[in-house]
């Protein structure tokens, strides 16, 4: 869920899954319809279905459409987030209640809701994956309400892992990706600084790609990761392991 264009993390996941021979369909926001249709025909994915996750009824309908297409499914990848630009800049305490609830609804609750409906058509030992960022755990400038939503999303992963693990042995994990230039990221002020800082200070001194995230999605979606659930898997060039600026790294 969440292909907007060819820079999307969901697009990276889609291609890596297709490369490994998976049958995959995807959802897109109504505003991304044109690009999504093109991506579907070019990629050979099974379907592209519109779904605005702001209303849980649309999520329920989406999984009815998925069931009509596939019958049962083996995995779900959720790669969706949204906050009003004005609500992630400035001071966190200035976020209005409606902006707070909108960010939480689209970026966190939509995964809980999707997990509920997906689980009804998911085979035993299936897998669910969502996307987080380090701003869930640490202060990141200009991330604000999105950091709070990602914190709630990571906590949701642990609760869903238990619910669905007990019910159907379904794994639920999230990938904490390093910063990647995408449409969603373009809403974050000074994002270029964040990219440069990561590139200069992460242990492997480079930024994360959507293919690296996609390959880890394949691992988590497949039986190779059996026994791994409720986890935050970092695909961030190791950035979350460092304490201070590297001794040879440039000052930004
Ligand atoms: N780009 C990064 O640096 C980065 C890092 C870590 C995590 N993430 C996370 O990865 C996920 C994917 O983001 P991305 O960076 O690929 O950007 P993106 O803009 O390509 O993807 C975000 C997706 O969310 C969708 N979306 C927003 N509101 C929606 C709604 N109401 N209904 C349905 N879909 C909606 C957009 O249409 C888009 O497809 C997000 O959860 C994001 O927070 C991104």
Image: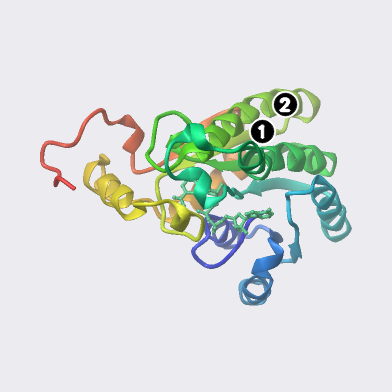
The answer to which of 194 and 248 lies nearer the viewer is 194
What element does badge 2 sit on?
helix
Query: Residue 155 location, x and y as percent?
Result: 60, 26
Spatial separation of the CA atoms under disc 2 and disc 1: 6 Å
Query: Residue 80: x percent and y percent?
Result: 61, 50
| Mark identifier at residue 171 | 1
On screen, 132 above or below 7?
Answer: above
Q: Which residue is mark 2?
A: 165
Label 1 SS: strand
Left or right, 223 with respect to 7, comes to right
Relative horizontal placement of residue 62, taking residue 54 as reference (left or right): right
Quarter of the rendering containing residue 142: top left
**Quarter occupied by the N terminus:** bottom right
Q: Which residue is more in the foreground, 76 or 224?
A: 76
For the question of whether residue 45 can be seen, the reply is: no
- Residue pictured at 73% horizontal, 50% vertical: 53
Question: For the residue carrying disc 1, how many other residues have a C-alpha within 10 Å: few (<14), some (14-19), or many (20+)?
Answer: many
- Please name the residue shown 57% across and 31% down the image: 154
């Amino acid at each position: 869920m969440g292909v907007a264009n060819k820079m999307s993390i969901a697009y990276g996941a889609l291609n890596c899954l297709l490369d490994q021979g998976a049958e995959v369909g995807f959802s897109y926001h109504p505003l991304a319809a044109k690009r999504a249709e093109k991506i579907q025909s070019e990629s050979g994915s099974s379907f592209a279905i519109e779904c605005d996750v702001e209303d849980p009824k649309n999520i329920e309908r989406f999984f009815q459409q998925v069931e009509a297409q596939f019958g049962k499914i083996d995995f779900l990848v959720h790669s969706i987030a949204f906050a009003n630009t004005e609500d992630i800049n400035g001071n966190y305490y200035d976020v209005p209640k409606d902006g707070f609830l909108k960010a939480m609804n689209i970026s966190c609750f939509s995964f809980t809701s999707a997990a509920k409906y997906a689980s009804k058509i998911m085979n035993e030992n299936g897998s669910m994956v969502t996307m987080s960022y380090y701003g869930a755990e640490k202060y990141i400038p200009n991330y604000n309400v999105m950091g709070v939503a990602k914190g709630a999303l990571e906590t949701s992963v642990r609760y869903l892992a238990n619910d669905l693990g007990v019910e159907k042995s379904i794994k639920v994990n999230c990938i904490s990706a390093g910063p990647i230039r995408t449409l969603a990221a373009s809403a974050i002020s000074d994002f270029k600084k964040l990219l440069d800082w990561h590139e200069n200070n992460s242990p492997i001194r480079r930024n994360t790609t959507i293919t690296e995230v996609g390959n880890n999605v394949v691992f988590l979606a497949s039986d190779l990761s059996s026994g791994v659930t409720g986890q935050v898997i970092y695909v961030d060039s190791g950035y979350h392991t460092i304490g201070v600026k590297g001794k040879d790294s440039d000052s930004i």
